Amino acid sequence: MNAPRILACALLALGPLTVEAQASPRPRDITVDERLATAAGLAVGDIVVLTPVAGSAGDTVRIAGITRRGADPSEVARSEYRVRVHLDHLQSLTRSGDRVGRFAIQSRGGALPDSVSAAINAAAFGFRAYPAAEVAVETSATFRVINRFHRAIGVITIVASAIFLLCITLLKVDERRRDVGALRLLGVSRASVVKSVVLEASLVALVGSAMGALIGWGASALVNWYYQGFYATPLRFAIVTPGIVAFAVGLSLVLGVVSGFLAAQRLVRTAPLELVSQ
């Protein structure tokens, strides 16, 4: 049996919890979360003592497992530690009797969550039932605001990038005015000039979008590596999905074709002799 360890944590919302070096012939099993195990240096099989009040007598328990938090955005910034015990064990530790702060109910048989919550609320006073979807919406309000903010930044970035791409394309095409004028004098049609410029702009857009996808993948991997370790959570803070890549490539290709076409039209509308003389 491993030696007892000293541990301070919070048991649900019932106040501080301390661990004392006491022995018990038949310790009950508990589980602790990964953050607590890392901070206190605990491992499976360690013996600790749980008490509802610091300095008071408690129960000797054994750590039977270490749990990892789920990918819940509402729990990322919370710094409390978690200990899971059996319900009767919790009642004996806290001497709270048949009381509970909150609990979850799973409906079966195709019952709608709204109808189930309405039936529970109509049964008695003193508590309130909410569908899980409504709880998720309320707890993720901050993240929905951040999502809108990022979407606005994305729209502004796309518009600015389109204008910048058009300006660069116009400058590059203007540098080849003499070459295009010479080709026109040799009998190359306007359509051929437009196609060549559009094709070149499309290739540049595809190469740029591929480089952007690689940079985005690397940046998201770095962000996830740092913040998942910092918060001890499997939540992914940045993702690059196939849908995002396809949207970025498609948008880049459309902007490249449009900018190339506009730049080529500005060039072919000028007389060949005028292009050569400039």
Image: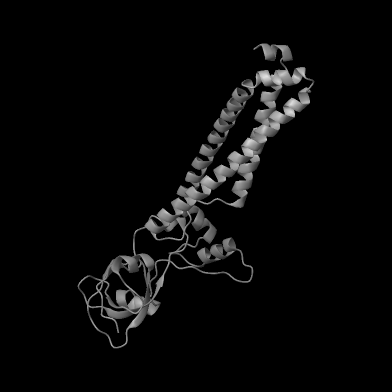
Residue 138 coordinates in the image, percent (x, y): 48, 53
Residue 181 falls left or right of residue 70: right
Q: Quadrant of residue 114?
A: bottom right
Residue 274 versus residue 163 in the image, above or below: above
Residue 154 versus residue 13 in the image, above or below: above
Q: Residue at x 54, y 34 (%)?
A: 156
Residue closest to the far bottom: 25
- Can residue 131 be seen at all in this image of the molecule? no
Q: Residue at x 56, y 28 (%)?
A: 164
Q: Residue at x 55, y 42 (%)?
A: 212
Q: Quadrant of residue 126?
A: bottom left
Residue 189 coordinates in the image, percent (x, y): 79, 23
Residue 194 versus residue 205 in the image, above or below: above
**In the rendered image, which quarter contains the C terminus?**
top right
Residue 198 falls left or right of residue 4: right
Residue 277 coordinates in the image, percent (x, y): 67, 11
- Can residue 133 be seen at all in this image of the molecule? yes
Residue 208 coordinates in the image, percent (x, y): 58, 39
